[in-house]
Image (cartoon, rainbow, N blue to C red):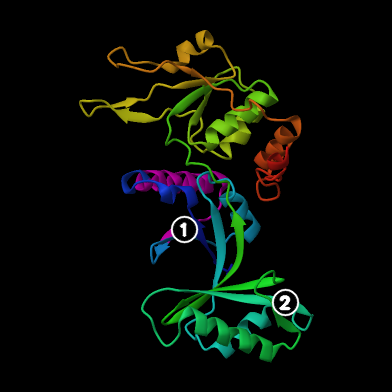
Amino acid sequence: MAKQHAWILRFGELGLKSRTVRRAFQKTLRKNLMQLAVDAEVPLIRGRERHQDMVYSTAPVHVVESLLSHALGLAAFERVTSLGKEIDPEKVAKQLLDGDPHKGTPRTFGVRVKRLGEKGAWNTITYSAALGAALCDLDSALKVDLSHPDRWYRMILEPNQIAHIETRSDGPGGLPVGVQGDVVACLRTLDDFLSAFLILRRGSRILPVLESKEEYVQILKSWDPYLGRRSRMRDEEGKSHERPAWGVSGLDLDDAAPYVQHRESAIKTTPLCTLEPLMGWTELEKEHLYLHILNPLLHPLHPDCESWIES
């Protein structure tokens, strides 16, 4: 039987919203994520533990993490392994070292502990110190470095169990697709495709027109399982309608008019927008963006976040 792995989902930016908006955005993110899993045929179970969103899967770790790296709105995800109900530092240290391929090799480490639930015999400081001492006793090659260690042991301590955060990976960030309305786009060129992704990343669903290149459409579907499906809204009478698109990318306003689908009874106070999200991007930045879209786990969105400060 395949081993089940668990991940904690970190929502980041979504936590800054008001409670009503936060709930709506998180609901959309969960819906998009589960549909991405269905489309990719990845077994995924969603759950919650102590107000933390979790996902569980028996699929290979790299497959699940590749899927999570496409869930727009997700700031980060952490793979967690339960070490059982025994929280004695010496026994926990032994479990950690038994699974360490570098045991016996000179290296530095640090311990970070997050305590959940009722306060028991341990607090975060005393448990960190006890676990660190136990690790050093069991492996004399270990040295403490709390600034830049070779490895952090990140632990989640509860009164009756303990877990180890094995890895933390950055998510794609942005906003869940569909929370900011729809944008009509024509994906003919590479710049059209990159522009559509940036719009998608800020929460707007892309409605590709028929002239769009199928290759680009299929790639974007790996980020938005509902690509091309119009969002719905309720009018002043509470009736549900398809929401008209609010923006255009990759084609003229006149050419986009038939795809917008304004309701005759609706009152629109703002004009249709032409979006050019690549304005100011260099060719190197576009290249990095393209690589990120194809493989977000391997290529971060902004590999260079500091050079602009010096320019």
Outermost residue, left side:
237
Q: Is residue 183 magenta?
A: no
Residues drawn in magenta: 22-47
> If the image is split into quadrants, where does the C terminus sit?
top right
Taking the image as shown, residue 219 lies to the left or right of residue 236, namely right
Q: Please give the residue where the numbered disc 1 appears in the rendered image.
A: 45
The disc label shown at residue 143, or none? none
- Viewer-side label of 1, 2: 2
The percent coordinates of residue 102 (x first, y second) are 76, 77
Overall secondary structure of the magenta stretch?
Answer: helix
Q: CA distance from mark 1 to mark 2?
A: 36 Å
Residue under the image location 67 percent in, 43 percent down: 302
Q: In this rendering, is residue 60 above or below 87?
A: above
Q: Nearer the viewer, residue 306 or 119?
A: 306
Residue 64 occupies quadrant: bottom right
The percent coordinates of residue 210 (x first, y second) are 57, 18
Taking the image as shown, residue 139 lies to the left or right of residue 224, namely right
Residue 96 occupies quadrant: bottom right
Q: Amino acid at mark 1?
A: Ile
Q: Amino acid at mark 2?
A: Thr
Q: Residues within 10 Å of mark 2 (few under 14, many from 20)?
A: some
